[in-house]
Amino acid sequence: EREEAERRFQAELEQCRRQAGVSTSSASSSSAPAAASRAAELRREAETFQRSTADISRENVGLGERLQRYRATAAADLERAVPLQAPNCWTAVDSPMLKTVTLLVRSSCLRRTFALHLIATYVWLFFLLFWLEKH
Protein backbone atom coordinates (compact mmCIF):
# COMPACT_ATOMS: atom_id res chain seq x y z
CA GLU A 1 0.00 0.00 0.00
CA ARG A 2 2.82 2.35 0.86
CA GLU A 3 4.71 1.64 -2.35
CA GLU A 4 1.53 2.17 -4.35
CA ALA A 5 0.92 5.54 -2.67
CA GLU A 6 4.52 6.59 -3.32
CA ARG A 7 4.30 5.54 -6.98
CA ARG A 8 1.05 7.44 -7.37
CA PHE A 9 2.59 10.46 -5.65
CA GLN A 10 5.64 10.37 -7.93
CA ALA A 11 3.48 9.98 -11.05
CA GLU A 12 1.21 12.87 -10.11
CA LEU A 13 4.19 15.00 -9.10
CA GLU A 14 5.80 14.31 -12.47
CA GLN A 15 2.54 15.18 -14.20
CA CYS A 16 2.34 18.45 -12.24
CA ARG A 17 5.93 19.25 -13.20
CA ARG A 18 5.15 18.61 -16.86
CA GLN A 19 2.07 20.82 -16.62
CA ALA A 20 4.11 23.51 -14.90
CA GLY A 21 6.76 23.25 -17.64
CA VAL A 22 4.12 23.56 -20.34
CA SER A 23 2.49 26.54 -18.62
CA THR A 24 5.79 28.42 -18.19
CA SER A 25 6.67 27.89 -21.81
CA SER A 26 3.28 29.22 -22.87
CA ALA A 27 3.70 32.20 -20.51
CA SER A 28 0.76 31.17 -18.36
CA SER A 29 1.81 31.47 -14.72
CA SER A 30 -1.61 30.65 -13.20
CA SER A 31 -1.07 26.88 -13.57
CA ALA A 32 2.20 26.81 -11.60
CA PRO A 33 0.60 27.66 -8.21
CA ALA A 34 -2.09 25.05 -8.87
CA ALA A 35 0.57 22.45 -9.61
CA ALA A 36 2.49 23.46 -6.48
CA SER A 37 -0.64 23.22 -4.34
CA ARG A 38 -1.42 19.82 -5.89
CA ALA A 39 2.14 18.69 -5.12
CA ALA A 40 1.77 19.89 -1.52
CA GLU A 41 -1.54 18.08 -1.25
CA LEU A 42 0.03 14.90 -2.58
CA ARG A 43 2.92 15.25 -0.11
CA ARG A 44 0.46 15.59 2.76
CA GLU A 45 -1.44 12.54 1.50
CA ALA A 46 1.80 10.55 1.24
CA GLU A 47 2.77 11.58 4.79
CA THR A 48 -0.69 10.56 6.01
CA PHE A 49 -0.27 7.16 4.34
CA GLN A 50 3.18 6.77 5.89
CA ARG A 51 1.85 7.58 9.36
CA SER A 52 -1.07 5.24 8.82
CA THR A 53 1.29 2.47 7.70
CA ALA A 54 3.50 3.01 10.74
CA ASP A 55 0.48 2.96 13.07
CA ILE A 56 -0.85 -0.22 11.49
CA SER A 57 2.60 -1.83 11.71
CA ARG A 58 2.83 -1.00 15.43
CA GLU A 59 -0.69 -2.32 15.99
CA ASN A 60 0.18 -5.50 14.07
CA VAL A 61 3.26 -6.07 16.22
CA GLY A 62 1.18 -5.58 19.40
CA LEU A 63 -1.50 -7.96 18.17
CA GLY A 64 1.17 -10.52 17.25
CA GLU A 65 2.62 -10.34 20.75
CA ARG A 66 -0.83 -10.74 22.30
CA LEU A 67 -1.56 -13.68 20.01
CA GLN A 68 1.67 -15.42 21.02
CA ARG A 69 0.93 -14.83 24.69
CA TYR A 70 -2.62 -16.19 24.41
CA ARG A 71 -1.48 -19.08 22.25
CA ALA A 72 1.11 -20.06 24.86
CA THR A 73 -1.54 -19.85 27.59
CA ALA A 74 -3.95 -21.97 25.55
CA ALA A 75 -1.25 -24.56 24.88
CA ALA A 76 -0.45 -24.73 28.60
CA ASP A 77 -4.16 -25.14 29.41
CA LEU A 78 -4.48 -27.89 26.82
CA GLU A 79 -1.42 -29.65 28.20
CA ARG A 80 -2.94 -29.52 31.70
CA ALA A 81 -6.29 -30.77 30.42
CA VAL A 82 -4.87 -33.53 28.20
CA PRO A 83 -1.33 -34.32 29.24
CA LEU A 84 0.27 -36.14 26.33
CA GLN A 85 3.54 -36.74 28.17
CA ALA A 86 2.20 -38.91 30.98
CA PRO A 87 1.54 -42.39 29.62
CA ASN A 88 -1.64 -44.07 30.83
CA CYS A 89 -4.26 -46.44 29.53
CA TRP A 90 -6.08 -43.65 27.65
CA THR A 91 -3.06 -42.42 25.66
CA ALA A 92 -3.94 -44.68 22.75
CA VAL A 93 -7.39 -43.03 22.53
CA ASP A 94 -6.53 -39.47 23.59
CA SER A 95 -3.88 -38.72 20.99
CA PRO A 96 -5.89 -39.71 17.89
CA MET A 97 -9.04 -38.13 19.33
CA LEU A 98 -7.20 -34.85 19.96
CA LYS A 99 -5.88 -34.85 16.38
CA THR A 100 -9.37 -35.57 15.02
CA VAL A 101 -10.98 -32.81 17.06
CA THR A 102 -8.24 -30.38 16.02
CA LEU A 103 -8.85 -31.28 12.37
CA LEU A 104 -12.60 -30.80 12.79
CA VAL A 105 -12.17 -27.42 14.45
CA ARG A 106 -9.74 -26.10 11.83
CA SER A 107 -11.61 -27.17 8.70
CA SER A 108 -14.92 -25.44 8.04
CA CYS A 109 -15.85 -28.08 5.47
CA LEU A 110 -15.36 -30.88 8.01
CA ARG A 111 -17.30 -28.93 10.65
CA ARG A 112 -20.26 -28.56 8.29
CA THR A 113 -20.06 -32.19 7.23
CA PHE A 114 -20.01 -33.28 10.86
CA ALA A 115 -23.00 -31.06 11.67
CA LEU A 116 -24.94 -32.49 8.71
CA HIS A 117 -24.02 -35.97 9.88
CA LEU A 118 -25.39 -35.22 13.35
CA ILE A 119 -28.61 -33.80 11.90
CA ALA A 120 -29.06 -36.84 9.65
CA THR A 121 -28.43 -39.17 12.60
CA TYR A 122 -31.05 -37.44 14.74
CA VAL A 123 -33.58 -37.39 11.89
CA TRP A 124 -33.02 -41.11 11.39
CA LEU A 125 -33.31 -41.74 15.15
CA PHE A 126 -36.61 -39.86 15.45
CA PHE A 127 -37.92 -41.55 12.32
CA LEU A 128 -37.14 -44.98 13.79
CA LEU A 129 -38.65 -44.05 17.14
CA PHE A 130 -41.93 -42.89 15.63
CA TRP A 131 -42.03 -45.64 13.01
CA LEU A 132 -41.37 -48.36 15.58
CA GLU A 133 -44.00 -46.84 17.85
CA LYS A 134 -46.65 -47.27 15.17
CA HIS A 135 -45.66 -50.84 14.22
Image: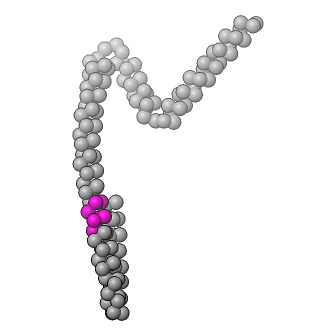
* Image quarter of the C terminus: top right
Which colour scheme appears in the figure?
one colour
Q: Is residue 130 left or right of residue 69?
A: right
- Residue 97 place in picture, x, y as percent: 41, 23
In this view, 26 is above or below 78: below
In this view, 55 is above or below 31: above
Q: Residue at 75% x, 7% y: name it.
A: 134
Q: Residue at 57% x, 25% y: name it.
A: 117
- Count the marks: 0
In this view, 106 is above or below 80: below
Can residue 87 be seen here? The reply is: yes
In the rendered image, residue 1 lying in the magenta stretch gets the answer no
Q: Quadrant of residue 29?
A: bottom left
In this view, 75 is above or below 56: above
In the depicted view, which residue is nearer to us: 1 or 106?
Answer: 1
- Residue 132 place in picture, x, y as percent: 71, 8
Can residue 14 be seen here? The reply is: no
Can you name the residue that lies furthest to the right here?
Answer: 135
Q: Residue at 25% x, 57% y: name it.
A: 51
- Residue 7 place in picture, x, y as percent: 33, 69
Q: Give the main secondary structure of the magenta stretch.
A: helix
**From which residue to which does the magenta span run?**
43-49
